[in-house]
Image (tube, rainbow, N blue to C red):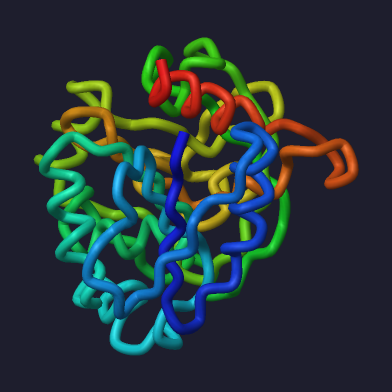
Amino acid sequence: MKAAIVVFPGTNRERDMAIALRGVTGQAPTMVWHRDTALPAGVDLVVLPGGFSYGDYLRCGAMAAHAPIMAAIREFAAKGGHILGVCNGFQILTEAQLLPGALLRNASLRFLSQDCFLRVERDGTAFTRHWAKGDVFRTPMAHGDGNYIAGAETIRMLEETGRVAFRYVSETGHLDAGDARLNPNGSMNAIAGVFSENLRICGMMPHPEDLVDPLMGGVDGKPLFTGLVEAVVG
């Protein structure tokens, strides 16, 4: 599988993402600079990693959504390409309107750097094929603007069409969107990640790429990358 990681000024998780992808593909992904106007030929997967693109000026991801490379990413998406956006990458995808909703300041108005637990809300997608619906896994979060919000009709659409990818829950899978211990950033319906209509674009706030090796403290995030490679290559 040929993967490309998009790097903006302020991106700081591209190396973590490269380690995760290299671990399951056996080859290093290509780094694509924000001022590039084309993706590498034959690319199978585009990843927008975490960080603080353009210093998070205006709104997180707002300036990156208008970077030169985004035209090529929109074209890639229109052709059915697979795209993963994590943390700032999720913010960029919403600002670019490739995913619905928006990410606002955490309800606590504090930057959160801690582990959380996510529940898989839809299995069988390229991003979740190595999990069953209802599985719970641990993953780190590190963000100040992870509070997912959308209009009532959009939330209803996401719920009814199975486009919620992950939710914040307890270690045992208990859901309580009003409990700040379980839903620390205050996201609507405890939503931690969503899919595009064709299920080929996924955005999520926590960082599965930071738990892909026992030396990192666990491999809870590895199934996402293993399944993604299998789905794209197969």
Which residue: 41% across, 64% down? Answer: 6
Decide which of 106, 209 is in the foreground and name it. 209
Which residue: 44% across, 28% down? Answer: 127
Residue 98 can be seen in this image: yes
Above or below: residue 43 compared with residue 34: above
Identify the image quadrant of residue 143: bottom right
Number of marks in the rendered image: 0
Question: For this view, does 140 lie left or right of residue 192?
Answer: right
Residue 147 can be seen in this image: no
Q: What percent of the width, then of the height, locates residue 180?
A: 58, 51
Question: For this view, does 62 lie left or right of residue 166?
Answer: left
Q: What percent of the width, then of the height, locates residue 207?
A: 60, 50
Decide which of 69, 54 is in the foreground and name it. 69
Identify the image quadrant of residue 91: bottom left
Q: What percent of the width, then of the height, locates residue 50?
A: 52, 63
Identify the image quadrant of residue 92: bottom left
Above or below: residue 18 compared with residue 230: below
Which residue: 42% across, 23% down? Answer: 233
Q: What percent of the width, then of the height, locates residue 189?
A: 37, 39
Above or below: residue 229 compared with residue 97: above
Decide which of 218, 67 is in the foreground and name it. 67
Q: Quadrant for the C terminus, please.
A: top left
- In the picture as drawn, the residue positioned furthest to the right comes out as 215
- In the picture as drawn, the residue positioned furthest to the front comes out as 41
Above or below: residue 11 compared with residue 209: below
